[in-house]
Amino acid sequence: MLFDDPALKALKQSFETKKERKEGVVRASDRSFGFMETADRNSYFIAPNFMKNLLHGDKISAVITTDATGRNQAEPESLIESALSDFVGRVKVNSFEGKRKLSVQPDSPTIKTHIPCDDRRQDKSQELKNGDWVKCRLTKHGLKDDRFRAEILEYVTAAADPKAPWTVSLKELNLPLQCPPCPENLTFNEQNEAREDLTALPFVTIDSEKTKDMDDALYITKADDGSFVLYVAIADPTGYIDENSALDKEAAKRAFSIYLPGRDIPMLPRELSDDLCSLREGQVRPVLCAKIPVTTSGEVLSSKAIFTLANIKSQGKLIYNQVSDYLEKGQADGFKPSAEIDAQLKLLVEFTHVRDQYRCTHSAPFRNHPDYEFVLTEDGALDHIELNYRRIANQIVEESMITANIACGDLLAAHFNAGIFNTHKGFDLSESRNILDLLRQEGFEGATEESIATMEGFSAIRRYAACQESPYLDCRIRKLQEYSQISITPAPHYALGLKNYATWTSPIRKYGDMINHRLLKAMILQRPSPRLPDADTLLTMNTARRVNRQAERAVRDWLYVDYLFPDIEKKTVFKGEILDVVRGGLRLILQENGASVFIPGTYISDDKTALEFSNTTGELLVRGLCALRLGDVIPVHIVDINKTTRSIVAAPVEPVGGLKLPDAQALLQQRRR
């Protein structure tokens, strides 16, 4: 037959071979079409008839064709990796011919597909209702199987559960909902180790009012020559937890305590974190203590630091705001320290100013951005948000912990050449040309490809940026930096201007600090070193840190949409700081509450040709002239909140670049029609 003709088969094979194929990631649009973005930053149109079998985020292989207008488009051919595997979504229950039909809407701002599903739960005691949250697994994909289908694995929580923001966010990321259980007959395993008795010294803890897991206490002395010796006493959970125990394995798996708005999930059992290891006022506690000399100029003398096992008794659970009020104003409601603690606080202030000045000279000052504390109602709703700036009490603790971690980093590097180190490589040197162009534009002289690769050069640039009236340069260089990482070998921390930096001051909350405790103890007691961290440990910790941050952002975004919804009708005006300039709009943070909002270009001007959003330079150009840029603060009001995608859309209150301001509400209504 003709179809079996070898020549025809060869010709068809030749046509197939000549087809242009590319791999890329699917990006859905607000409409029925989409795009495939490739690694070389090209974008190819995907027609609606293909998009119905795809999900936003799918990685696919596609044949590149050209339509009648000459536009390149992608025709999906095979699925490389699905955007969904296990996921959390909301159930929709339909009845058809007397039978319940289930589908699930994935909890994703970009995936709007309702996926038919089967109930495969082992425990079906909870009847599924519309809107309930469930954990699912995708079993069929449209591109691979011509249809989508999923199976329900687990009931998560009810549709109206006020705790849903926390429960759903944690389940989506496969994070624990509770702290680990406490082992029976938990005992302190280091009773026979000699400990220095420091219980007579007036150590104090400084924390938030609600803090229960106090893991650091401070004491300080000052010599006649003006130098200091800072004592940092840290809780000792490794005295209770053997490194081969089941509890240690669980802590290693979690890697960190999880801190979410209004809720925390400890890495260790609360019996340890909030009680046995917590440095409670008036109670004797075993600690790992460092005595760290600091010169009159603020230099930390790591080589002369002494680490020891000790017992202390905190003589005061001090609260950040009360301490700051007392030190800044001379008095504080509900707080009147003894003469001994008063003297300690004043010495700690002196030490803090000396260390701050040293860092401002040798590395760079910290930006004083506020922390946003979410205060919840009894039923779990967001009541209000409190802004907490870095006041003097916060700075005391911050400088003390940094000092302690400098000493630990240098010691572990010298003694073991191993440990858990926090590292930062400085600039992303693949962006060297852009960095040098930016520095010349902003008046920084003398920078070279060689100098920006050094810690000294990096620190000098950051100091220069911190001195500028506008935050633009500081915002730009932050976007041109590498991300900080955790390392198991010593490496510099450019952002802090330090050769080594290893944290050990939060062993209740960080497994890496427990590892460093064991290394320090091996050195103190001159015994064989414990198990050194390996690549698997490193991967677990870096992954956990990233995922925990995702969970925190997810809960915050969820709470913000309910909290700010009434402000649409009120037309509340907020101060919006520009964080990013993207194609088609601006991303801002509301300074009053920390919420992230987006301003689309259509809400800035009806004339699209007048606007140019430059992600490269971080600027909004109006007819070729810079109208707004990173770090600028403008008045905005909220126009729309999508509770499904948990996104907040805002609009400027005042005209930008002399352009007429569109009616954002009218545009919104028009779009909805």
Image (tube, rainbow, N blue to C red):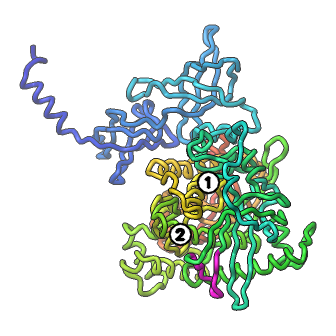
Q: Amino acid at mark 1?
A: Lys
Picture residue at 45% right of the left edge, 64% below the top: 417
Of labels 2 and 1, the one closer to you: 2
The x and y percentages for residue 356 are 65, 80
Quadrant where the C terminus lies? Answer: top right
**Relative to 94, is 414 on the left or the right?**
left
With respect to residue 522, does 404 lie above or below?
A: below
With respect to residue 419, does 183 lie above or below?
A: above
Q: Secondary structure at mark 1?
A: loop
Question: Tags 2 and 1 in contact by the CB under 8 Å rule?
Answer: no
49 inside magenta stretch: no
Q: Main secondary structure of the magenta part?
A: loop
Picture residue at 42% right of the left edge, 67% below the top: 428
Q: Which residue is mark 2?
A: 411
Q: Which residues are magenta?
A: 292-302
Residue 399 is marked as none
With respect to residue 91, does 632 lie above or below?
A: below
Q: Dividing the picture into quarters, in which one does residue 253 lie? A: top right
Name which of mark 2 and mark 1 comes first in the sequence: 2
Q: Amino acid at mark 2?
A: Leu
Choose between 313 and 591: the one closer to the eye. 313
Choose between 504 and 478: the one closer to the eye. 504
Q: Which residue is mark 1?
A: 510
**Relative to 629, is 219 on the left or the right?**
right
The x and y percentages for residue 207 are 77, 62
The x and y percentages for residue 23 are 32, 43
Distance between the alpha carbons at the discs numbered 2 and 1:
19 Å
296 inside magenta stretch: yes
Picture residue at 61% right of the left edge, 26% below the top: 154
